[in-house]
Amino acid sequence: MDPARIVVLGVGNLIMGDEGLGVRCVERLEAAGALPAGVTVIDGGTSTHELLGDLEDLDLLVIVDAVAGEVPGALVRLEGDRIPAALSNKLSPHQHGINDLLANLRLLGRSPRRVVVHGVTPAVIALGLELSSAVEAAMPALAAAVVAEVVEAVGA
Amino acid sequence: MGKRIVIDPITRIEGHLRIDCEVDGGKVTDAWASGTMWRGVEQILLGRDPRDAWAITQRFCGVCTTVHAIASVRAVENALGMAVPKNAQYIRNLMIAAHAIHDEIVHFYHLSALDWVDVTSALKADPKATAALAESLSPWPHNGVAVQAATKARLETLVGSGQLGIFANGYWGHPAMKLPPEVNLLAVTHYLQALDVQRKANKIVSILGSKTPHIQNVAVGGVSNPIALDSQSVLTLERLLAVKALIDELAQFINEVYVVDVAAVAAFYPEWTTIGRGVTNYLAAPDFPLDERGTEFVTSGGYLPGGDLTKVQRITKFGDALLKDNVAESVKHAWYQGGKGPLHPYQGETIAEYTDHQPAGKYSFVKSPTFAGQPAQVGPLARVLVAAAVGDEAIVKHLTRVLGIVEAVAKIKVPLDGLHSTIGRHAARAVMCARNVEILAGQYDLLMANIAKGDHHTFEKPVFPSGEVSGFGFHEAPRGMLSHWVVIAGGVIKNYQAVVPTTWNAAPRNEADQLGPYESSLLGTPLADPERPLEVLRTIHSFDPCLACAVHLIDPARRDIVSVRAL
């Protein structure tokens, strides 16, 4: 797969503790140069429409985000049919979230060929710039999972 | 695994907006606007370096990133009494104009047009008649039969697939939907085209801001990227030329599509020039500073009590005393510790005191700001009315054009008073968008001319005194006047308050129990079907709320009728 057609997108709100783990993850991946050359890394924050141009006609979109679950710090990977339902529960400005962005891409006929979500279950969602210790402990494994996903796709 | 996994709604932004309406005889008789999530983001800034505040404040909200960065650096610069290099003012002006255009286009087409446009009706449209109608309204070259037929085919495929996606939750077939099928199809065509056009505005922000959605090219004292016409890593001539091409493309879409569409929607819904009036005290700040100290601006600021154009009080410069001395926030009906009466933002406190939703008591996490003790509406309509009051022909000419199209299509006369309405807010936003793209081109020319003179200066180093200083910065954000207020002691932040546009417009009742603009604008709104309160959404969306919106209706006996979510 052409690395130029792969995007790793971190989403979340940096000032709400673990909610920002997706953004923190891609910041660290970028700083460490951990991803194959040519792959685009985006800090999406809580934006939606601004990202449209960057997500068109991709071969692979990897979304990194906080994913609700029972065990804080647990790693999660979602693919295929489970993604739209999961993302549709997002609260975002005007309730337009990443799911609406994907729907608009579909409407334009420019959807990514594959979308995968990698995440960690948050422990603390509250005002603050730091990650909780449970999530912090899971961050290296999250980064490794994202890198493995991308490396495998590039080699495929 | 068999386990249900949800990516939580959690708090990506400030929180939900909840609207409670009392309905009697098919009309709204009372209303309460409530922000349901604590907004204490300012607390995170206390004790920090004021030079870092802009980077944190631009994470306040997902749609309003750039605007908080700008208001924040202006507040700190005001506290320090700083001059900002002209190039930095121009570059910032380009970024905020492009950001505003992006927001205005997305707001109309992607966040509110579906309140007026029935997508399912578009399936009944004749592409040929649609093209003929479109070509009678505008010279836009992408309105032809083939384009309309392609949109219809795309919609048919979508409906056939059973996955309506973005269109799944509309009020299709609602009795308040009144556009003919051809107008609906045309609107969907432009919805799709606008998805491409909004990218161009965002591209300008990303070229000049180094990065979107969160710009990097701003600093207390100017902008952080040097200008060098021969280097790849900074703002180069090549990048600046790319900006110029994008500006021209935006201008064509705005003038030939967006402005025309808003006028056409208004023409088919003339009754909406009399609905949604609300608070008619208007407040706007001047913006697009042209000099180092912010004494000369492209657009005008002022306070307009009672919507009376002859009574405008001008706001003319950064640090303007009229603005500084007249803003206060009440927490009588907000979930914060109070008892001290309305407080000026420098003295503002943000200590939560939650009570549950008490319509006669506290019921919102949004504070209630006032200007000279009165509630005020902010936003594009405030901007346009202040422009009309001070005789700013550059804005008034676009207003005249919009009203002219409405009158030609609807064969009716729209009085200026019709602007104090739900549709008036949409019209004013389109007017400002048409003006903003001219400002974008003008600031581009000013920047290029200044660089050509040999001035490459973009940054002035801030110096912090050891004592205490305070300042405020304002910006006419797309949703209205945004102000940041900062107290700095010994070089660190001692107090910080952001009075955001949605705080003005979504305010709960104030110290004198006067209704806020959202609340007031809903009074008298007719509801064709209280189970599907589309009309309430139309008015709330016309303010471009910066919160997800939940609408909750109660009958006079205060029993819940229905709880619906706004999209």
Image (cartoon, coloured by chain):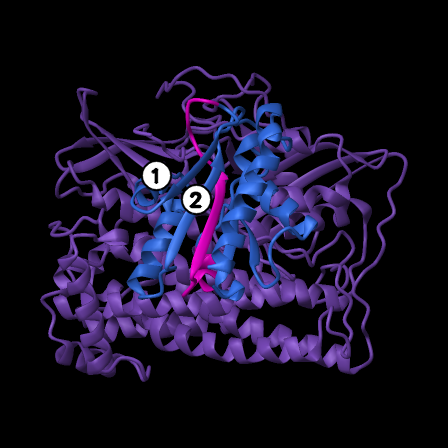
Whether residues under marks 1 and 2 lie with C-beta atoms below 8 angstroms apart, the answer is yes
Quarter that holds the N terminus of chain B: top left
Residue at image position (89%, 40%) is B465
Q: Which residue is mark 1?
A: A86
Position of residue B536 measured from the top left corner of the image (x, y, whole percent):
26, 42
Residue at image position (42%, 70%) is B197
Q: Residues within 10 Å of mark 1 (few under 14, many from 20)?
A: many
Three-letter residue code for mark 2: Val
Q: Secondary structure at mark 1?
A: helix
Picture mark count:
2
Compared across the picture, whether B425 is left or right of B533 comes to right
Compared across the picture, whether B502 is left or right of B168 comes to right
Quadrant position of residue B143? bottom left
Marking on residue A117: 2
Chain corresponding to blue in the figure: A
Can residue A131 be seen in this snapshot? yes
Can residue B322 be seen in this snapshot? no
Position of residue A45 measured from the top left corner of the image (x, y, whole percent):
54, 46
Three-letter residue code for mark 1: Ala
Q: Secondary structure at mark 2?
A: strand
Residue sitting nearer the eye, B512 or B489: B489
User: Reading the chain from its start, which is encountered first: label 1 or label 2?
Assistant: 1
Position of residue B43 measured from the top left corner of the image (x, y, whole percent):
64, 29
Residue sitting nearer the eye, A56 or B205: A56
Compared across the picture, whether B100 is left or right of B326 comes to left
Residue segment shown in magenta: A49-71
Q: In the rendered image of this protein, which colour is used for chain B? A: purple
Q: Which chain is mark 2 on?
A: A
